[in-house]
Each structure stands twice: as C-alpha cells, then as structure tokens.
Image (cartoon, rainbow, N blue to C red):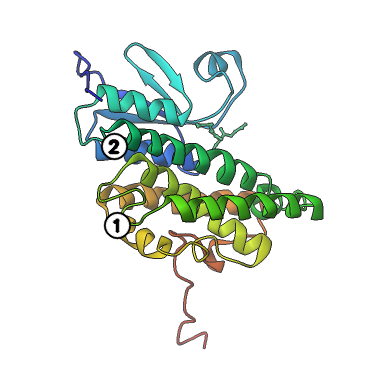
C-alpha cells in the first residue's frame, strides 16, 4: 500500500483508554509508525456527541484532520495508507489478504466469544452460566485449531516481519489467557506452540513497554473497581506483574 502522507502536521487523536485491547493495539501501531498523535483518554459512551464519532458507541476511535473513524481494523488500514512509517501490512496481495484473514479470525472468533466470559471473570456482578462456559469453550477449541494452522512464529505470527496481526493478537491473547485460566483453569498461550516465545519477543519492543505499562496500571484499578474474581496477582497473560514474594518480615 502506498502511504499518502497528510499534508498538514496536525496530530491524530486516538480516543479511548488503556484497559481496551483495541485501544492498545492502535496506540502501539501509532508508536511503531512514529506517527504524530495525541491521546484523548475517555470511556465508551452513548450520548449524541459520542455516537456521531463512533456510531456503535465503542472505543477506540481516531480523530483525523478529515473526520473521525471507528473500528480498529479499518483504522489500522487508514494508518497504513496515510503514515509513512514502517509498513505493518505485507505488500503481496495474498499475504496481505492472509493478514486481514488472521485479524478477522482473532477478533471474531477469539476476542468476541471470550468477551461473553468477562462478567464472571472481570466483575463479580454476575456468574458465567454453565451454558455460556460450554458454548464459549467449544468456539475456542475451533479457533485454537485455526490459529495453530495459520500462525508461523518465524519469529512473528505471520513471518519474519512485525505486522498488524502481532499488534492485535498481543492484547487479545494477554486478556484471553487470563480469561481461560480463570474460567477454565487452562492457558490459551500454552495451548498454541510458539505463542510463549513470541510473547517474550514482543515484550522486548519499546512500543510494547510503553503501552503495557499503562495497561497494567489501569487494569489494576479496573479490577479493583469491579471487585473482579480475577486479580493480576494470580498471573496469566503476557503482562500481569509477577506474583509478589513474601517479605522477610512477613515470612
Ligand atoms: N469492533 C470494535 C471493538 C471495540 C470494542 O469492543 N471496544 C470496547 C472496549 S475494548 C468498548 O468500547 N466497549 C464498550 C461497549 O461496548 O459499550 C473495534 O474493532 O474497535
């Protein structure tokens, strides 16, 4: 894709906040592209002003000099077409198609079903019913099998260069691993050979460290607010801080 650089040095404005895996994906893409951008920290909303910018009432959305855009995958494509930084999609049409295919699978068949379990994992307001647990588990098995076929870990998910798939998967797999451990007692990351080493590689990137630091801090507050059954101290995911060892005085 040819970058059509915006003529004016007007910063893009990324709206959302660091608990959102989609916000974190876009923030990291902007950092990787060394784009000129600022962040407007806000939660999802449904008032008229919010819906005029993000019609589904969701974060993240991007304010550009030409207008606003919501939905992470189209925003990633917009950045690819307008920013001159490092490409995040391959050029060859089939490989570009596979990049989009894999992102669709990760969003629709991994993230969306797992969200059905958020109430019983990240908030103590409701329990997940046995039917929901069973239905989501069945979908996750199909998705895990698909990802085993698609991901190559060479060393990035689809080849030897970083792509949008790595940025999308990073935050969805992090939260997903916490969810499967808490809801089912198994680790999403460990179910896919190569995923743990890839996660370690991704953690070394400067852009990951910037985004993950704010995510971990904000997520801690979010879990406390919701009195969530899951706590970061239980570990899991890619970014959960390591469990604290007992101090000598406490031992
Ligand atoms: N398909 C959307 C998903 C965005 C999404 O699920 N955002 C969540 C936060 S991670 C949200 O705004 N939830 C609030 C709501 O649905 O009311 C995208 O690609 O950006």
Residue 209 drawn above or below residue 16: below
Query: Which numbered disc, 2 or 1, marks the residue that appears first in the sequence?
Result: 2
Residue 102, percent from left and from top: 45, 41
Q: Are marks 2 and 1 in contact (CB under 8 Å)?
A: no
Q: Which mark is residue 85?
A: none
Q: Residues within 10 Å of mark 2 (few under 14, many from 20)?
A: many
Identify the image quadrant of residue 178: bottom right
Please tell me whether mark 2 sits on a helix, a strand or a loop.
loop
Where residue 193 appears, as percent x and y from the top left, is 44, 65
Q: Is residue 216 left or right of residue 182?
A: left
Q: Viewer-nearest of labels 2 and 1? A: 1
Choose between 190 and 7: the one closer to the eye.
190
Label ID, residue 155: 1
* Residue placed furthest toward the top: 66
| Nearest to the observer: residue 237 or residue 132 | 132
* Pointer 2 residue: 88
The 10 Å Cα crowd at callout 1, few under 14, some 14 to 19, many 20 or more, is some
């Amino acid at each position: 894709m040819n970058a059509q650089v915006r003529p004016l040095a007007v910063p893009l404005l990324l709206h959302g906040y660091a608990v959102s895996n989609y916000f974190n994906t876009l923030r990291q893409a902007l950092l990787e592209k060394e784009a000129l951008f600022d962040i407007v920290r806000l939660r999802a909303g449904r008032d008229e002003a919010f819906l005029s910018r993000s019609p589904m009432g969701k974060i993240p959305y991007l304010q550009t000099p030409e207008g606003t855009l919501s939905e992470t995958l189209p925003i990633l494509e917009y950045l690819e077409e307008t920013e001159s930084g490092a490409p995040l999609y391959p050029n060859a049409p089939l490989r570009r198609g596979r990049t989009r295919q894999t992102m669709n699978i990760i969003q629709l068949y991994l993230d969306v079903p797992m969200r059905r379990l958020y109430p019983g994992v990240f908030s103590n307001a409701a329990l997940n019913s046995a039917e929901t647990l069973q239905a989501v588990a069945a979908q996750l098995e199909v998705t895990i099998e698909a990802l085993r076929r698609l991901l190559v870990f060479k060393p990035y998910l689809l080849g030897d260069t970083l792509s949008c798939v790595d940025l999308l998967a990073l935050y969805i797999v992090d939260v997903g691993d916490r969810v499967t451990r808490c809801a089912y007692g198994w680790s999403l990351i460990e179910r896919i050979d190569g995923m743990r080493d890839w996660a370690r590689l991704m953690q070394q990137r400067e852009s990951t460290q910037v985004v993950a630091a704010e995510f971990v801090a904000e997520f801690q507050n979010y879990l406390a607010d919701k009195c969530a059954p899951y706590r970061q101290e239980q570990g899991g995911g890619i970014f959960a801080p390591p469990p604290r060892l007992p101090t000598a005085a406490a031992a």
